[in-house]
Amino acid sequence: MKIMLPLDEDQRSVCPSFARAPFFLLHDTVTGESRSLENPAAQADSGAGLQAAQFVVDSGAEVLITVRCGENAAKVFQAAGISIRKALEGDAAANLAALAMDKLPELTHFHAGFRGISG
């Protein structure tokens, strides 16, 4: 299974912003491989949520772990069959471990988006 998480600049901590995260971690539970990828939507003038969502879909991820997510991005994930899980505070490794123990709840509340305003 492939899992995606938004990362802060340190490339270890979960970024509270999905669309504007500087990096994403792509973790493959089958191979154990983890790769840090630059978020191509991080500096977008507008539509960052949709662009970041498409990046996640294109990565082949089956699960997204994130603190929060906009409605438009959530619709993309739902259409693609990607599970959205609520991240815990802390680093990516702790969140991956929590997911493996089925301790991350499904994210069900989505914000309306920031429309080009960093949040």
Image (tube, rainbow, N blue to C red):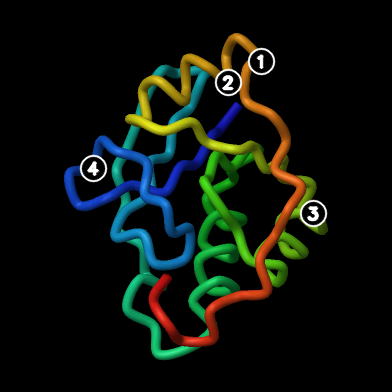
Residue 84, how many percent across, how many down? 67, 43
Amino acid bearing label 1: Asp
Quick check: 113 above or below 4? below
How far separated are the C-alphas under marks 3 and 2?
19 Å
Q: Residue at x 66, y 15 (%)?
A: 102
Residue 61 image position (x, y, % from top left): 59, 42
Neighbour tally class for label 3: few under 14, some 14-19, many 20 plus, Cα within 10 Å:
few
Above or below, comparing residue 39 to residue 82 in the picture: below
| Name of the residue lying farthest toward the left | 10
Which residue is at the front of the view, 119 or 85? 119
Q: Position of residue 38 (x, y in %)?
A: 29, 58
Residue 102: numbered disc: 1
In primary-sequence order, the first of circles 2 and 4 is 4
Amino acid carrying mark 2 in the image: Leu
Left or right of residue 116: residue 36? left
User: Which residue is under mark 3?
Assistant: 78
Instruction: Decide which of tag 1 and tag 4 comes sooner along the chain.
Output: 4
The alpha-carbon separation of the residues under discs 3 and 4 comes to 26 Å
Between discs 3 and 4, the one toward the N terminus: 4
Q: Rate crowding at label 1 as few (under 14), some (14 to 19) or many (20 or more) other CA atoms within 10 Å.
A: few
Label of residue 112 in the image: none
| Foreground pick, 98 / 112 | 112
Q: Quadrant of residue 86?
A: top right
Determine the CA span between mark 2 and mark 4.
Answer: 19 Å
